[in-house]
Image (tube, helix red, strand yellow):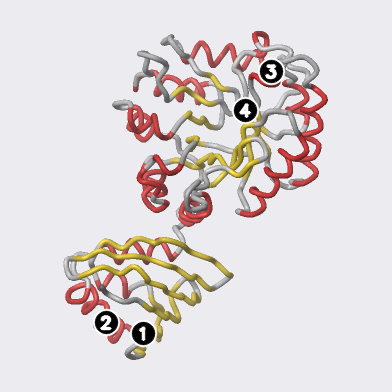
Amino acid sequence: MSILSGKGMYLWIISRVEGGDPQKIAELAQQAGLTHVLIKVADRNYKYNIDNKTGHDYVPGVVSALRARGIQPWGWQYIYGTNPVAEAQMAIQRTKEFNLDGFVVNAEVEFKQKNMEAPAKQYMKALRAGLPNTPIGFSSYRYPTLHRPLPFETFLEYSDINMPQVYWIQASNPAAQLLRSVREHQALSVWRPILPTGAAYPDGTWNPTPGQITDFMQACKDNNISGANFWEWYYARRITGIWDAVKNFSWPTSPAPTPDISIRFLDALNSQDPVKVTALYGNGGVHVNAQRTVQGSEGILRWYNSLLRETLPAARFEITGSTTQKNLRVLTWTATSSKGRVLDGKDSLGIQNGKIAYHYTYFTVR
């Protein structure tokens, strides 16, 4: 059985998708039934998805938002082989920093040159030594016979899963190309479970069609492949019908876990329903704010009725950051309403038996 199953999407440049908003990215991923999202976290031996002007790292917010909705965050890195140990160290650093569920190595044209087997082995040995318990995937060309001397076997020796790029560019036969790719990869001396990546991006005037996206996923299922990825989020959202084709394809996996209470709390606030928010609290729950402390569902309901009807009517709440420590959730958030904005919201939620037992909130309306 493969480490991954169901539908996945590569995410290249976070800032250009959904305004870089982690919650919107996670919401869309959940609506599309994605089980995992593969985020670029490194390029060569440099961090990736860092704002050049501000230094803001887009990765942790997306990882947190995805994980809270039961979606696996994986990382990936494009490697060049010029400094393999430094590249591996950066991959290890970023994977550990965000406690990623898995990591994908993307090796392409640079490793088609002669004498690249040694740097490939250096990189993979260092990566595996630094991430002994992290699933590692290998992403490269669909047909090994056309891309030698790239050392497919060297990469796969240290990998857990093979993710060939089955891009049917300028063609319309994804199922046939998938079958050829699987046969060629199975013929390698080192074999790993295959979870291919399909084409959800343009090439010149050519675009994949929704029907081809569906055919690709159906071919995966028909051949007992546990899942499929697509390259890439930005393009899949821009080419008419592509995102919906992924979204509408049914690929049942094990039931998704219940979203973390921080996400349920956010969703309840945005429903504008005080009863729905209050239902997240346990019996005898305590709510503390700058003005007063209330205990019990009746007092908490009154507080949320005032918040959602008078203080911030019809507000849109967005989580800007979150941390989890066993039974504690610390959230930072913003809200926009006809009566003002909140830019400094911060909540601490103490959780007991899946309910909010203690809640401290601070915010100012401007």
Residue 82 in picture, x, y percent from top left? 74, 29
SS category of the residue bearing label 2: helix
Q: Which residue is mark 4?
A: 139
Tell me if 260 is positioned left or right of 28 in this view. right
Q: Is residue 196 visible?
A: yes
Q: Amino acid at mark 2?
A: Trp
Residue 168 in picture, x, y percent from top left? 48, 14
Q: Closest to the observer: 282 or 126?
A: 126
Query: Foreground mark, 3 or 1?
Result: 1
Query: What is the number of the mark on residue 186?
Result: 3
Q: Amino acid at mark 3?
A: Gln
Q: Amino acid at mark 4?
A: Ser
Number of other residues with Cα within 10 Å of mark 2, as a class: few under 14, some 14 to 19, many 20 or more: some
Residue in the picture at 48% in, 55% down = 61
Query: Foreground mark, 3 or 2?
Result: 2
Residue in the picture at 49% in, 75% down = 351
Q: Amino acid at mark 1?
A: Asn
Residue in the picture at 62% in, 32% down = 78
Number of other residues with Cα within 10 Å of mark 3, as a class: few under 14, some 14 to 19, many 20 or more: some
Residue in the picture at 58% in, 11% down = 180
Distance Cα–Cα, label 3 vs label 1 = 61 Å
Query: What is the number of the mark on residue 289?
Result: 1
Query: Foreground mark, 1 or 2?
Result: 1
Q: Is residue 1 visible?
A: no
